[in-house]
Each structure stands twice: as structure tokens, then as C-alpha cells.
Image (cartoon, rainbow, N blue to C red):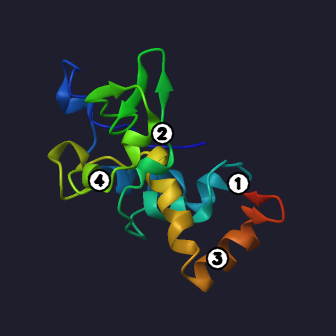
Amino acid sequence: MISPGFDFEDAPDQDMFLTRQESHDLFKQLLAPEKSEGATFYNNPLYLNFLKGEREYQCTAWSNPTYTVMGWRKPCYPLADEHVEHVQELFDQDIWEKYGVGKDPRCANCMMHCGFESATIFQALKTPKDWATLIKSGAAHKGGITAA
């Protein structure tokens, strides 16, 4: 599995984190056919294209809730503004109107698989061409949707 880092606000050196464009540029290099030939990635091809900047999605972190010994992380794995006892609190639509690229500045450079790989699946369910891409890659099959 491959995924970019995210801005961790408590880290002392904030300059170490990549901008969204820097992540796109890096993943274009890393995933270039001459460099990635023969490599196995446990991500679907739509997400890999997103990492290269060839697609845009809005975060769907609500589809991958994270539980820790402190409770459910809210709103998502990278931010964890608070921990809540009941997972249902993560599915309140009002929460997600506040988070995501262009909504919360902390989300500006996030491209984490926990929020965006699921977004590729939701979009593919609405787009036959994207669905075909998942099927062709082996990510979608009789057993469900998995990593490619």
C-alpha cells in the first residue's frame, strides 16, 4: 500500500511536509512505468492516478472510521480533534460539511488512503468507465471491492 503523509500539526518541523502539488509531482515520478514496472501496489488504480494528480476527489474519511483505546477518532484518522464513544457520531452529515479540501485548512494537503481511496470507489459506482477500470485491475470482483 502506498499513501502520502499528511500535515501533522504537532510536529516541530512543519517544513518537512509536502504540499499537494509536491505530492503529485513525487508520485508521478514514483509511479512512472519505468520505475514501477513489476511492483505490486495494494491500492486501486484510480487512487494511484489521484496521487499523480490525474484525478480529483473529495475526502470520504467517514467511510473508514478509526477506533483506538480512547474511542472513535473524530473527524478522521489524521485529525482526531476528539474521541467519541459511539461510531454513529461520525456519520452526522453536519460534520463532513466542515472538513475536506477547501473546507478546513488542515485538509489542504491531505491525500491519505483512509479518506481518498474510498472516494474512488464511491465515484466508480457512479461511473461505468471507472468501474471497468477497477474490474480490469482486479480490485472489483465477485467477492467485493478490494485493493488491486
Q: Which residue is mark 4?
A: 96
- The first of marks 3 and 2 along the sequence is 2
* Local crowd size for mark 4, using a 10 Å CA cut-off: few (<14), some (14–19), many (≥20): some
Sequence-wise first label, 1 or 3? 3
In this image, 102 relative to 114: left or right?
A: left
Q: Which residue is mark 2?
A: 65
Residue 72 appears in which quarter of the rendering?
A: top left
Q: How many marks?
A: 4
- Labels 1 and 4: the sequence-earlier one: 4
From the image, state whether disc 3 or disc 2 is nearer to you.
Answer: 2
Residue at the (21%, 21%) spot, across then down = 10
Marks 3 and 2 sit apart, C-alpha to C-alpha, by 24 Å
96 with respect to 4 (left or right)? left
Which residue appears farthest toward the right when viewing the image? 142
Q: Amino acid at mark 4?
A: Trp
Dot 1: element:
loop
- Mark 2 or 1, nearer chain start: 2
Location of the C terminus (image quadrant): bottom right
Disc 3 target residue: 131
